[in-house]
């Protein structure tokens, strides 16, 4: 059995045949995704003296912007969404443990009021009233 090596961080590391095969295959898959799918191919017909471009399977962002395609700026949306999430987390941290539990169960874990009422052994109407009261409290906190 011959020794197999894989270059990692500029150093050759001895690996088993299975690992070498896996790494070689995965490197090729990465190159395919990064390069091959984004490159156009050419069909050359020697008899008709015609060259036809076969478009790439996937366009790169850079090529699309080079030919004039415009894209929405998602950075501002991301920043706004992140800011809203931070504000919501800060507002939720001001709730009592019982209030926080109720809101997370209803909105994060998507339990129904009826399911939560059954778990807590109280009436569903009490859950509904508490939910409305807590949402009003969160609204006031976020409005500041």
Image (tube, grey):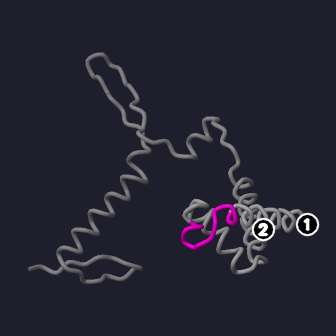
**In front of the other: 107 or 34:** 107
Q: CA distance from mark 1 to mark 2?
A: 11 Å
Residue 119 % position (x, y): 54, 72
Which is more N-terminal, label 2 or label 1? 2
What kind of secondary structure does the magenta stretch mostly adopt?
Answer: helix
Relative to 143, 96 lies left or right: left
Q: Is residue 118 magenta?
A: yes
Identity of the residue furthest to the right in this view: 144
Crowd tier of the residue under label 2, counting other residues whose Cα lies within 10 Å: few below 14, some 14–19, many 20 or above: some
- Dot 2 corresponds to which residue? 87
At horizontal 58% and vertical 61% (from top left) the residue drawn is 114
Magenta span covers which residues? 116-127
- Dot 1 corresponds to which residue? 144
Element type at mark 2: helix
Residue 97, quarter of the rendered image: bottom right
Q: Is residue 9 magenta?
A: no
């Amino acid at each position: 059995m011959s020794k197999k090596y894989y270059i990692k961080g500029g150093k050759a590391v001895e690996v088993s045949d299975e690992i070498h095969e896996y790494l070689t295959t995965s490197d090729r898959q990465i190159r395919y995704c990064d390069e091959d799918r984004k490159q156009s191919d050419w069909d050359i017909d020697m008899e008709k003296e015609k060259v036809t471009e076969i478009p790439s399977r996937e366009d790169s962002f850079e090529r699309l912007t080079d030919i004039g395609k415009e894209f929405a700026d998602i950075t501002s949306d991301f920043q706004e969404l992140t800011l809203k999430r931070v504000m919501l987390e800060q507002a939720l941290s001001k709730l009592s443990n019982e209030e926080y539990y109720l809101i997370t169960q209803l909105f994060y874990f998507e339990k129904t009021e009826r399911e939560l009422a059954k778990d807590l052994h109280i009436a569903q109407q009490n859950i509904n009233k508490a939910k409305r009261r807590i949402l009003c409290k969160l609204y006031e906190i976020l409005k500041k």
